[in-house]
């Protein structure tokens, strides 16, 4: 009985570790471009008459900001791919048997 509880607890810990690792990887992938473009924008001279460069930087900043915001939406799909328990619960919720 105690060994079964320990094994179950270890399996849950493993799933929690996989979920956290996947979440960190997605955060880095979605956040790093935004950080790079923001740092580049801080270093660009805003007084320059090169409007094309400023427009391109603004466009890239908007695109990477959108990517950063999709980071919060992606959680469901990351958890669905990584966690078997989450998949079972999602299946039970989405497919209700009468």
Image: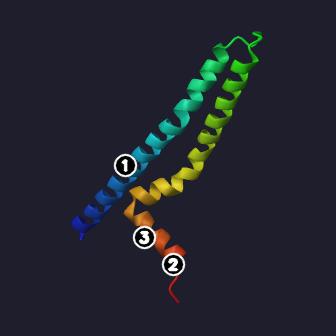
Q: Mark 2 or mark 3: which is in front?
A: 2
Give the quadrant of residue 49: top right
Asked if the residues shown at circle 3 and circle 1 are in contact, with their CB atoms under 8 angstroms apart, the answer is no
Dot 3, crowdedness within 10 Å: few (<14), some or many (≥20)?
few
Residue 36 pos. (x, y %): 56, 25
Q: Residue furthest bottom?
A: 98
Q: Mark 1 or mark 2: which is in front?
A: 2
Residue in the image at 24% along x and 68% along y: 4
Element at label 1: helix
- Spatial CA distance of label 3 from label 1 is 18 Å
Dot 2, crowdedness within 10 Å: few (<14), some or many (≥20)?
few
Element at label 3: helix
Name the residue that disc number 2 marks: 95
Name the residue that disc number 3 marks: 88
Q: Mark 3 or mark 1: which is in front?
A: 3
Name the residue that disc number 1 marks: 17
Give the quadrant of residue 7: bottom left
Residue in the image at 68% along x and 34% along y: 62
Asked if the residues shown at circle 2 and circle 3 are in contact, with their CB atoms under 8 angstroms apart, the answer is no
Which sits in the foreground, 18 or 78?
A: 78
Dot 1, crowdedness within 10 Å: few (<14), some or many (≥20)?
few
- Relative to residue 63, is residue 23 drawn left or right? left
Element at label 2: loop
Q: Earlier in the sequence, mark 1 or mark 2?
A: 1
- Spatial CA distance of label 1 from label 2 is 28 Å
Classify 66 as above or below 12: above
Label count reads 3
Q: Earlier in the sequence, mark 2 or mark 3?
A: 3
Residue 84 pos. (x, y %): 38, 64
């Amino acid at each position: 009985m105690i060994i079964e509880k320990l094994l179950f607890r270890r399996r849950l810990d493993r799933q929690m570790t996989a979920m956290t690792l996947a979440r960190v990887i997605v955060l880095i992938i979605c956040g790093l471009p935004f950080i790079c473009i923001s740092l580049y924008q801080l270093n660009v001279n805003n007084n320059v008459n090169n409007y094309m460069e400023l427009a391109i930087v603004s466009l890239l900043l908007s695109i990477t900001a959108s990517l950063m915001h999709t980071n919060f939406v992606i959680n469901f799909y990351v958890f669905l791919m990584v966690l078997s328990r989450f998949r079972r619960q999602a299946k039970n919720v989405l497919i209700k048997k009468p």
